[in-house]
Amino acid sequence: MPFTALLRHCLLLFALVSGLSVAAPFAQAQVQQGGQTLTEQARSQLQQSTRQVQQIRKSMADIESSETLRSLSEQALEVQRVADQAVRELGPELERLDARIAQLGELAEGSSEGSTVANQRKSLGSQRNQVDDLIKQGNLLSVEARQLSEAIEKERVQRLGQQLGLRVASPLSPLLWQKVIAQVPADLERFDVLLRQQRQALERGIGKHGWALPLSAVGVALVLFFPLRLWLRRLGRRVAASERAPKGRLRRTGLAVWLMLVGTVLPGVSALVVVAALKAIDGIAPRFVQVADSVVSASFLAAFITALSACLLVPKRPSWRLLPLDDQAAARLRKYAWMAAGLMWVTWVGRSVNRAARTSEITGVALDGLLALGYIALIMAMLMSLTRLHRRQQREQAEQAAANGGNVSPAARRQGGWAVLVRVFGHLTVAAALLATLLGWINLAMFAAQQMIWLGVVGLALLLLLKFADDLAMRVFAADSPSGKAVMLATGLSGNRLEQVGVLASALLRLGLIFLALIAIALPQGNSAVVLGWFDTLRNGITIGDTVLRPWTLVRALLVLGIGLGVLQLLQRWLVDTYLPRTSMDAGGRNSVSTVARYLGLAIVALWTLAALGLGFQKLALVVSALSVGIGFGLQAITQNFFSGLILLAERPVKIGDLVRIGDLEGDVRRISVRATEIQAGDKSTLIVPNSELITKTVRNMTLSNPTGRVQIKFQVPLSTDVAQLREVLLGVYAAHPGVQEEPAPSFYVDGIDGGMITINSFGHVGSPRNVYSIKSDLLFELLVALQAAGIALSTPTDVHLLKDSQ
């Protein structure tokens, strides 16, 4: 199948799984609500949440570990979410009751009403009081739960600081290992007890349920881990290398994301299947459940690290490598990635086993010290490999710069800057962690080393996903892609506009990925319930004044805006291309109607969008009144031009195609908008004239109401000229030209006699003012030829000669 189809199927499967996980509790809530009223359900939930808050307060006195604090904080935030949800569900019910009570009206003092109305008023009042009490109780419970969660988080931060600041014996201290050796027999006995309990639980489960389910789970896990995983990897490579894969970088980034998903999900699911099968037959001891869960979580994490390194480094296929690394560095970093995954797995599972076995504190300190030294050694090896890589790249860049005359590409310069920054940060972290380990601050060293590795993993995953999101968005909205062609056909967007949409989509996807990366960085030492609380805040909406903006409301408004603009474009196209050409209106009239219709449609779509956002007309009136101040001060000219444009479109003193003159400017009107009018001059340049200039100043419209043009020829002849013959010649020239109209007939006038000269003036009318200049030129040319043939001389300048007297 094509590569895009493969990705689409994966996304569809993810959406189905997510939809089922979301729909299940919703359906359960609907079933629960069917058996009791909304008020009873809310009361039951709030009572249960109140008892849970009391239980959390009692449990805070017996806190033993940060995991317990995290669990209590999550429970408190869950109570807050339940209380907020109950308040949101009861809000519409309270509004409905208020509306029904308002229909009954207020009871005047001293008056009475019928028993039926009185009973209804009493019943509705009682229901309203109950709902109002529950809303107040829910708000109070939400505040208490939030304050309780904040107190627990404060306690967690304090304990984390104390834990990081705890100083123990150095791993190099012989005293530490003497204490460890002394505790070995007791710790081995504790491990033996834990393993014996697990063995007994497994034997009881198998004796009761048999081997069928565990063996089947192991078989499914082996199939998932080996043949299916390898086959899916080969399938992805084969599809990416085929001609059906999209061109460009998307085939490489898409393959990398596919390999990361396959390499992460299948190994983790394999461990999950085995653990779930053992839990199903009660084959896991109660103290070992936490260890089994840690094995699953650690398997997912280790698989993610190894899969991410495999899809980014690709040591055996350099052409598919996304990072600027050579083969030597890729091979070394691949081995280090396996070591990092193993260390993370051992750390996660080892700590869980220590807690389950309840080993001595000194054993945990020694284990953390060894792990810290392992992390430090691993990070130092990675930094050394990156340093060697940087030196090789510098030599190559120096050779290329020498070949190119000393020029280094900006991309290479940027990569070098990032590499130096990463190495400096890494060396400082390693030095601090090593010093802390040697001085006995084991927890601080472990925290710094683990955070550095986790930061690197999240950063590399973010880099891959950012590239993939950009490639995917640009491909989906590319003009030559099937999806891009469909979008252009449906919306009428041009290729450039579609590319802009792709850039905006890429930016939104990248912002979302960066937000998720920040959550992933803070999650290991944070609280998952806090993250879920952020999403609940976004889902419930952000309150701005009296308006609550919710994500679904924004999405609905965007859908309304898109649908409204699409319908408006279809109606505009039908109006311009189908209806208006069949009317008797000229081009200017059609332009006026289509322009007014478009702006009226935009106003309706804007009001519809604001209504979808939940902004009523009263709030819009407040916004308009606030904007009126800005309009009065800063937007006066724009407002004046806007209303002038509406006047031009309505009265049409100037329309498209008219020849107008404004002062010294003359040209044809090409476009009239609500802000300015475009006038094309004779040299094909365009004049942008504000509409207020056409309304407030004198404008000569030379083509208004279909006027005719008039040619004027005025010249002087000597007093001795035969005026009658001249008249016949001039009128004959007028009559011979096809552009001169017969009605009104050309005219001949003697304008004056002065200084021995006769001034002749004549007029002829043409069909359009646009033809005056060219026809006048033709008439003058023919007149000069005719006068020369008739022997009629025109006046010539008088020569003045100055003579100097010799005396």
Image (cartoon, rainbow, N blue to C red):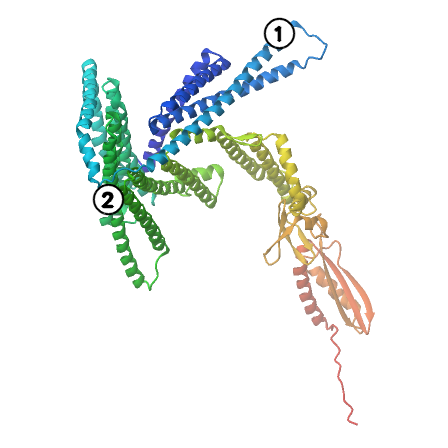
Circle on res. 30: none
Residue 177 spot, x, y in % from top left = 19, 36
Q: Residue extending furthest front?
A: 175
The residue that label 2 is drawn on is 377
At label 1, the amino acid type is: Asn
Residue 185 lies in what quarter of the image? top left
Secondary structure under tag 2 reads: helix
Q: Residue extending furthest bottom?
A: 807
Q: Nearer the viewer, residue 332 or 578?
A: 332
Q: Nearer the viewer, residue 474 or 111?
A: 111
Name the quadrant of the N terminus: top left
Q: Residues within 10 Å of mark 2 (few under 14, many from 20)?
A: some
- The residue drawn where x is 69% and y is 65% is 780
Using the rendered image of the protein, determine whether residue 266 is visible from the camera's viewpoint: no
Residue 745 spot, x, y in % from top left = 75, 56
Secondary structure under tag 1 reads: helix
Residue 62 lies in what quarter of the image? top left
The residue that label 1 is drawn on is 119
N-term mark: 2 or 1? 1
